[in-house]
Image (cartoon, rainbow, N blue to C red):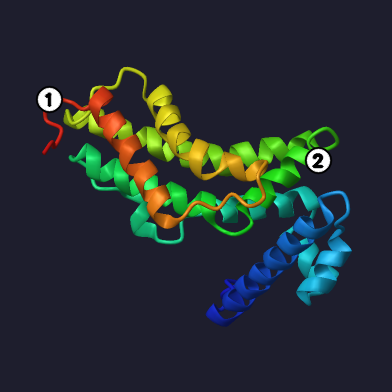
Protein backbone atom coordinates (compact mmCIF):
# COMPACT_ATOMS: atom_id res chain seq x y z
CA UNK A 1 0.00 0.00 0.00
CA UNK A 2 1.42 3.32 -1.08
CA UNK A 3 1.86 6.16 1.41
CA UNK A 4 2.43 8.77 -1.28
CA UNK A 5 -0.23 11.53 -1.31
CA UNK A 6 -2.66 11.38 -4.20
CA UNK A 7 -2.73 14.00 -6.96
CA UNK A 8 -5.87 15.45 -5.39
CA UNK A 9 -4.29 15.79 -1.95
CA UNK A 10 -1.15 17.36 -3.43
CA UNK A 11 -3.28 19.87 -5.29
CA UNK A 12 -5.23 20.74 -2.14
CA UNK A 13 -1.99 21.15 -0.19
CA UNK A 14 -0.60 23.43 -2.89
CA UNK A 15 -3.79 25.52 -2.87
CA UNK A 16 -3.64 25.89 0.90
CA UNK A 17 0.04 26.82 0.75
CA UNK A 18 -0.70 29.48 -1.88
CA UNK A 19 -3.55 30.87 0.25
CA UNK A 20 -1.29 31.02 3.31
CA UNK A 21 1.49 32.83 1.46
CA UNK A 22 -0.96 35.29 -0.09
CA UNK A 23 -2.61 36.08 3.26
CA UNK A 24 0.72 36.33 5.07
CA UNK A 25 2.11 38.69 2.45
CA UNK A 26 -0.87 41.01 2.90
CA UNK A 27 -0.54 40.94 6.67
CA UNK A 28 3.22 41.53 6.63
CA UNK A 29 2.76 44.50 4.30
CA UNK A 30 -0.07 45.95 6.40
CA UNK A 31 1.13 45.25 9.95
CA UNK A 32 4.85 44.57 9.57
CA UNK A 33 6.73 41.47 10.61
CA UNK A 34 6.43 42.03 14.35
CA UNK A 35 2.73 42.86 14.11
CA UNK A 36 1.81 39.66 12.29
CA UNK A 37 1.22 36.40 14.11
CA UNK A 38 0.79 32.91 12.71
CA UNK A 39 -2.67 32.80 14.28
CA UNK A 40 -3.69 35.87 12.26
CA UNK A 41 -2.27 34.31 9.13
CA UNK A 42 -4.26 31.11 9.69
CA UNK A 43 -7.47 33.09 10.19
CA UNK A 44 -6.87 35.29 7.13
CA UNK A 45 -6.01 32.36 4.87
CA UNK A 46 -8.95 30.23 6.01
CA UNK A 47 -6.89 27.26 7.19
CA UNK A 48 -6.53 25.69 10.60
CA UNK A 49 -3.55 26.49 12.78
CA UNK A 50 -2.52 22.84 12.55
CA UNK A 51 -2.45 23.05 8.75
CA UNK A 52 -0.41 26.23 8.84
CA UNK A 53 2.07 24.91 11.41
CA UNK A 54 2.52 21.73 9.37
CA UNK A 55 3.73 23.74 6.39
CA UNK A 56 5.32 26.65 8.24
CA UNK A 57 6.30 25.80 11.83
CA UNK A 58 7.69 29.31 12.46
CA UNK A 59 7.04 32.82 11.26
CA UNK A 60 10.60 32.95 9.95
CA UNK A 61 9.93 29.90 7.75
CA UNK A 62 6.82 31.59 6.38
CA UNK A 63 8.72 34.78 5.61
CA UNK A 64 11.41 32.72 3.85
CA UNK A 65 8.71 31.23 1.62
CA UNK A 66 7.34 34.67 0.78
CA UNK A 67 10.79 35.93 -0.18
CA UNK A 68 11.46 32.85 -2.30
CA UNK A 69 8.11 33.23 -4.04
CA UNK A 70 8.65 36.95 -4.72
CA UNK A 71 11.93 36.22 -6.54
CA UNK A 72 10.65 33.18 -8.40
CA UNK A 73 10.64 33.50 -12.18
CA UNK A 74 7.16 32.49 -13.29
CA UNK A 75 8.13 31.39 -16.81
CA UNK A 76 10.68 28.57 -16.64
CA UNK A 77 11.97 29.46 -20.12
CA UNK A 78 13.22 32.77 -18.70
CA UNK A 79 15.64 30.81 -16.54
CA UNK A 80 17.54 29.84 -19.67
CA UNK A 81 18.50 32.99 -21.58
CA UNK A 82 19.85 32.39 -25.08
CA UNK A 83 23.55 31.56 -25.11
CA UNK A 84 26.11 32.35 -27.78
CA UNK A 85 24.79 35.89 -28.23
CA UNK A 86 25.78 38.21 -25.37
CA UNK A 87 23.41 40.97 -26.36
CA UNK A 88 20.37 38.72 -26.68
CA UNK A 89 21.15 36.88 -23.45
CA UNK A 90 21.72 39.99 -21.36
CA UNK A 91 18.63 41.65 -22.83
CA UNK A 92 16.51 38.67 -21.76
CA UNK A 93 18.06 38.73 -18.28
CA UNK A 94 17.60 42.49 -17.97
CA UNK A 95 13.94 42.39 -18.94
CA UNK A 96 13.33 39.56 -16.50
CA UNK A 97 15.01 41.58 -13.75
CA UNK A 98 12.82 44.61 -14.48
CA UNK A 99 9.70 42.43 -14.30
CA UNK A 100 10.77 41.09 -10.90
CA UNK A 101 11.68 44.47 -9.42
CA UNK A 102 8.59 46.26 -10.73
CA UNK A 103 6.07 43.64 -9.60
CA UNK A 104 3.54 44.81 -7.00
CA UNK A 105 4.76 44.42 -3.44
CA UNK A 106 8.49 44.02 -4.13
CA UNK A 107 9.42 47.49 -2.87
CA UNK A 108 7.12 47.06 0.14
CA UNK A 109 8.81 43.75 0.96
CA UNK A 110 12.20 45.45 0.94
CA UNK A 111 10.84 48.18 3.23
CA UNK A 112 9.67 45.55 5.73
CA UNK A 113 13.12 43.98 5.81
CA UNK A 114 14.84 47.34 6.26
CA UNK A 115 12.41 48.53 8.95
CA UNK A 116 12.58 45.32 10.97
CA UNK A 117 16.29 44.67 10.49
CA UNK A 118 17.45 46.02 13.91
CA UNK A 119 15.09 43.64 15.76
CA UNK A 120 15.06 40.76 13.28
CA UNK A 121 18.40 40.60 11.45
CA UNK A 122 17.45 37.16 10.17
CA UNK A 123 14.99 38.83 7.79
CA UNK A 124 17.84 40.49 5.95
CA UNK A 125 19.70 37.21 5.77
CA UNK A 126 16.60 35.45 4.44
CA UNK A 127 15.99 38.07 1.77
CA UNK A 128 19.63 37.94 0.71
CA UNK A 129 20.07 34.17 0.74
CA UNK A 130 16.62 33.08 -0.51
CA UNK A 131 15.96 35.89 -2.98
CA UNK A 132 18.80 38.08 -4.14
CA UNK A 133 21.66 35.56 -4.21
CA UNK A 134 19.97 32.77 -6.21
CA UNK A 135 18.99 35.32 -8.85
CA UNK A 136 22.45 36.91 -8.81
CA UNK A 137 24.07 33.48 -9.16
CA UNK A 138 21.94 32.73 -12.23
CA UNK A 139 23.32 35.86 -13.91
CA UNK A 140 26.87 35.00 -12.92
CA UNK A 141 26.50 31.47 -14.26
CA UNK A 142 25.22 32.90 -17.55
CA UNK A 143 28.33 35.07 -17.84
CA UNK A 144 30.50 32.05 -17.06
CA UNK A 145 28.81 30.26 -19.97
CA UNK A 146 29.41 33.16 -22.35
CA UNK A 147 33.01 33.27 -21.19
CA UNK A 148 33.45 29.61 -22.08
CA UNK A 149 31.85 30.17 -25.50
CA UNK A 150 34.09 33.13 -26.27
CA UNK A 151 31.21 35.57 -26.63
CA UNK A 152 32.36 37.35 -23.46
CA UNK A 153 35.73 38.06 -21.91
CA UNK A 154 35.13 38.53 -18.19
CA UNK A 155 37.85 38.08 -15.60
CA UNK A 156 35.46 38.58 -12.68
CA UNK A 157 31.91 37.43 -13.44
CA UNK A 158 30.76 38.33 -9.92
CA UNK A 159 31.76 41.95 -10.48
CA UNK A 160 30.28 42.00 -13.98
CA UNK A 161 26.94 40.63 -12.74
CA UNK A 162 26.91 43.27 -9.99
CA UNK A 163 27.56 46.03 -12.53
CA UNK A 164 24.84 44.88 -14.90
CA UNK A 165 22.12 44.40 -12.30
CA UNK A 166 23.13 47.61 -10.55
CA UNK A 167 22.73 49.70 -13.71
CA UNK A 168 19.16 48.46 -13.97
CA UNK A 169 18.08 48.50 -10.32
CA UNK A 170 19.49 51.98 -9.68
CA UNK A 171 16.85 53.37 -12.02
CA UNK A 172 14.02 50.87 -11.91
CA UNK A 173 13.92 50.00 -8.22
CA UNK A 174 15.92 51.94 -5.65
CA UNK A 175 14.23 55.33 -6.17
CA UNK A 176 10.98 53.58 -5.19
CA UNK A 177 12.37 53.13 -1.69
CA UNK A 178 12.35 56.91 -1.11
CA UNK A 179 9.94 58.27 -3.71
CA UNK A 180 6.46 56.80 -3.33
CA UNK A 181 5.37 58.09 -6.75
CA UNK A 182 8.39 56.76 -8.63
CA UNK A 183 6.93 54.69 -11.45
CA UNK A 184 8.85 54.88 -14.73
CA UNK A 185 6.95 53.77 -17.81
CA UNK A 186 7.70 50.61 -19.76
CA UNK A 187 9.58 52.45 -22.49
CA UNK A 188 11.90 54.11 -19.99
CA UNK A 189 12.68 50.83 -18.25
CA UNK A 190 13.27 49.07 -21.58
CA UNK A 191 15.71 51.83 -22.57
CA UNK A 192 17.62 51.39 -19.31
CA UNK A 193 18.00 47.68 -20.05
CA UNK A 194 19.11 48.34 -23.63
CA UNK A 195 21.73 50.87 -22.53
CA UNK A 196 23.03 48.58 -19.78
CA UNK A 197 23.38 45.77 -22.32
CA UNK A 198 25.31 48.00 -24.72
CA UNK A 199 27.68 49.05 -21.94
CA UNK A 200 28.26 45.44 -20.92
CA UNK A 201 28.83 44.42 -24.52
CA UNK A 202 31.31 47.26 -25.04
CA UNK A 203 33.23 46.31 -21.90
CA UNK A 204 33.03 42.52 -21.95
CA UNK A 205 32.11 41.46 -25.49
CA UNK A 206 34.40 38.67 -26.68
CA UNK A 207 35.93 38.17 -30.10
CA UNK A 208 32.98 36.02 -31.18
CA UNK A 209 30.29 38.22 -29.62
CA UNK A 210 27.43 39.06 -31.96
CA UNK A 211 27.69 42.69 -33.10
CA UNK A 212 25.76 44.72 -35.64
Q: Which mark is residue 181?
A: none
Helix, strand or loop at label 2? It is helix
Name the residue furthest bottom.
8
- Residue 20 position (above or below residue 173): below
Category of crowding for the residue at label 1, using alpha-carbon neighbours closer than 10 angstroms: few (below 14), some (14–19), many (at least 20): few
Q: Is residue 155 visible?
A: yes
* Front position in the image: 100 or 168: 168
- In percent of width and height, residue 13 lies at 64, 73
Which quadrant of the rendered structure holds the N terminus?
bottom right
- In percent of width and height, residue 173 lies at 55, 44
Answer with left or right where residue 196 lies relative to residue 101: left
Residue tagged 1: 207
Residue tagged 2: 116
Q: Residue at x 36, y 43 (%)?
A: 193
Between discs 2 and 1, the one toward the N terminus: 2
Answer with left or right where residue 166 lies relative to residue 120: left
Name the quadrant containing residue 156: top left
Q: Residue at x 81, y 65 (%)?
A: 41
Q: Residue at x 47, y 36 (%)?
A: 136
Amino acid sequence: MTTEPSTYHRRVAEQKRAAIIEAATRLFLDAGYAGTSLAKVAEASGVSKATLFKQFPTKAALFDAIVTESWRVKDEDDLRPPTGDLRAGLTAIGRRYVALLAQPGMAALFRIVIAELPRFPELGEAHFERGKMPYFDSVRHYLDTENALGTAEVDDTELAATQFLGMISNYVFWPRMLLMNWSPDDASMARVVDEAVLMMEARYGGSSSARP
